Image (cartoon, rainbow, N blue to C red):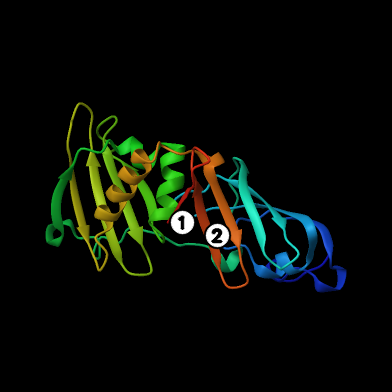
Amino acid sequence: MITADGAEGHPPGAPYDRIIATAAVQQVPHPWVTQTRPSGTILTPWHTAYHDGTLASFTVNGDGTADGRIVGTVAFVFLRDKRIYASINDEECDETTAQRSHTSVVPYRVAGDYDASLALGMKVPGCSVITVPDPTAELTGTLWFVDPTTGSWASLHYQPNTRTYPIHQSGPRNFWDEIETAYYWWRDNGRPGPQRWRITITHEDQQVTLQASSPAGAARH
């Protein structure tokens, strides 16, 4: 039992055949890669700010990189220094001064659909979604999309038996525009599920690639 920062691994015991994490990451710490022997495995909960339900398995290569894929559904808290604290501030999220529009995108599609939420988390970085039900009306409430880093936010009000939904958004990012664009991208690319995503860890960064549904090629975002 070692008391230390798990993101740094444990160099004295390296190299390892397997590293198994029980806290979620958005970026796999590179020490985990360098401390795993070639062909070894890293298994970790891998989440985005938007979507917190995947388990990823990586195979380490001899050149210090790793290739990963999503292999399961789990939800774990983030590593302590990677946690995202998203909240709704009534003063900052003032709908009376925000841009107004409407959307025909069904709220469930961007907040409840597992596959769509996975794609949105990758295409709209930094975005967290918060659902606030209306305590006075069934199946009525507000979806809040917030980015604590830039202060950008968007809200979508929903209720039963409607075809369009009011949108408010404010901040340096046109947040709802990004979300809607990402949703249509996901839909137009065949509504890909977890099995089509690949995650590559290099020495410098992490890349997420959507594998084509046929051998013709892949679409990278």
Few, some or many C-alpha atoms within 10 Å of disc 2 (few <14, some 14-19, many ≥20)? some
Q: Residues within 10 Å of mark 1 (few under 14, many from 20)?
A: many
Which amino acid is tagged 1?
Ala
Between 179 and 49, the one lying in front of the other is 179
**Quadrant of image for the C terminus:** bottom left
Q: Secondary structure at mark 2?
A: loop
Label of residue 49 in the image: 1
Q: Is there a contact, CB below 8 Å, between mark 1 and mark 2?
A: yes
Inspect the image, locate mark 2, and give the three-letter code of the amino acid beneath it: Gln
Is residue 21 in view? Answer: no
User: On screen, 160 above or below 219?
Assistant: above
Q: How many marks?
A: 2
Q: Nearer the viewer, residue 128 or 219?
A: 219
Q: Which residue was labeled with disc 2?
A: 26
Residue 54: percent from the left, percent from the top? Answer: 57, 45
Relative to 150, does residue 197 appear above or below in the rendering? above
Left of 35 or right of it: where is 80?
Answer: left
Kindly indicate the quadrant of the structure image that contains residue 158: top left
In the rendered image, the quadrant that contains the N terminus is: bottom right
